[in-house]
Amino acid sequence: MSEQPSGYSSRLYNEDLAPRRESGIWKAWDLFCVWMSAVHSLGGYTFAIGLLVLGLNGWQIILALLGGVAVVHLGCNLMGVAGQRLGVPFPVFARVSFGVFGANVPALLRAVVAIFWYAIQTYLASAAVMILLLKIAPGLQPLTEPSFLGLSLLGWICFLGLWLLQLIVLHRGMETVRKLSDFAGPVIWIAMLALAVWILAKANWVIDFNHTESGQSLPFGSAVVALLAGVFLTVSYYAGPMLNYADFARNAPDRKSVIRGNRLGLPLNASLFGVVAVVIALGTVQVYGKAIHDPVALVAEIDNVTALLVATIAFAIATAGVNIVLNFVSPAYDLANVFPSKINFKRGGLITALIALLVMPWHIYSNPLAINLFLGGIGALMGPLFGILLTDYYLVRKAKVNIDDLYSDSPSGPYFYHKGTNLNSIYALVGAGIPTLVLALVPSFTAWAPFSWPIGVAFGALACLIADKIHPDSHRRAAELNHLTRQSAEKSETAAN
């Protein structure tokens, strides 16, 4: 265990939150695999096909996915380069804008969304595994009848099995997470390509990219609006991991690795996955007369037991990979940031897993109102937070940050602000968050809901600049005072020597 550096506060520092002191070991390939794990999932397929509900046809869905991925690519380059340059995880990066203690606000908001989606994704994956197990071994059917706390015995076995598997991976640290993502990402590609070939063969290699859910094409104006809605719904789908991308990019050795990893993982990989998902869905239209939105239901149609078993294992591994990357790493760091002296990365992961177990996600998932109001509401704040953090870092500070001061709780420190919190950023979050929440949650603004992320980013950025204009010295005065204090201390030390 390394010693705590001089001047660092135990209220802000532990080894897991420490800045990277040497060249990172996550190369471009590793970041590429992170995106493969994040993109290649049951949820990714279901989301892509869900865009049919907007009235888009196959070609338009592909365009919407390509446009959304392009925006995500830009956002992750901005956040990733900042994270790599500073070498710190997301909650520590947030200290720059929100203050050394105020950073817990964005960190915990991100953690809540991640923990609940981690729980829900684990449940959905366990349900998928259960369906496939029953297909392979029908004799397990009696285990689905008894119910304890809303879940059958087989349901509990599958849920706890995946829950434990993911916990073991995270408990072994970020290096194991890297190795899992390196393995899980390619695995699901193989499974999805095999599924595409299988369904295309059943469809006699004929699909209709002009197919729509209603059977009718949208008028030009409506199609443009629906296409843009699809673009920003795609961005919203990745809003969480885009916000805390510094958790991964910090481990890269240089800026070039981040840019290259993102280029491979997003414009290339994510776009191709979207195309494959659309092809599979349109293939199901030819075979079954309608698009099958659930890939598990589609896999269950495979009548070869060996192929079905391989598909079951592939989806289980892929789901564990995507869940750990998107929903487990973030709260582990975020919770460690609250009490660094008591909670490290592994303990943060354990707390995440325990909460995910206690909330019994099958009850949450069966209540659309809870998901829309609670998770949808908090999720809508990801846009304003993204706008505030990047605007403050790139435009207000010109990317100039003193890393050591991010771990100092000295009142004279440049990131201590008002009792450890930058009120400018809090005001900006409230000012941008309220209209974004209204758009996302109020039924009369349903048509605007898909655009809540870009509107939130714009409002957050504007509110950040306005707040800095009104109180321009909030961080500069502290920085100047800190600089003068250091100069005085250096002079005294020189005189003493």
Image (cartoon, grey):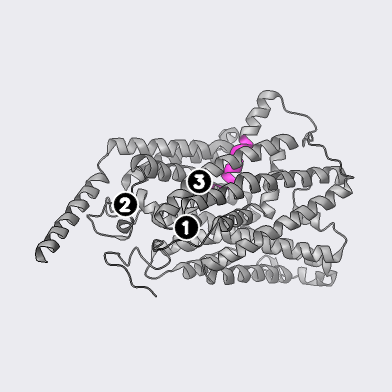
Which one is nearer the viewer's eye here, 76 or 139?
A: 76
The circle on residue 77 is: 3
Q: Quadrant of the C terminus?
A: bottom left
The type of residue carrying mark 3 is Asn
Q: Residue furthest top?
A: 220
Q: Report if residue 56 is visible in the image.
A: no
| Rendering coords of residue 294 (x, y %) | 75, 52
Which numbered disc, 1 or 2, marks the residue that appears first in the sequence?
Answer: 1
Q: Is residue 423 above or below residue 355?
A: above
* Helix, strand or loop for disc 2: loop
Q: Are marks 1 and 3 in contact (CB under 8 Å)?
A: no
Q: Amino acid at mark 1?
A: Pro
Write the start and end of the magenta stretch as one range: 229-240
Residue at point 58% right, 61% down?
A: 324
Q: Would you say the residues marked 2 and 3 are in contact, meaning their CB atoms lie under 8 Å apart? A: no
Q: Nearer the viewer, mark 1 or mark 3?
A: 1
Which secondary structure dominates the residues rendered in magenta?
Answer: helix
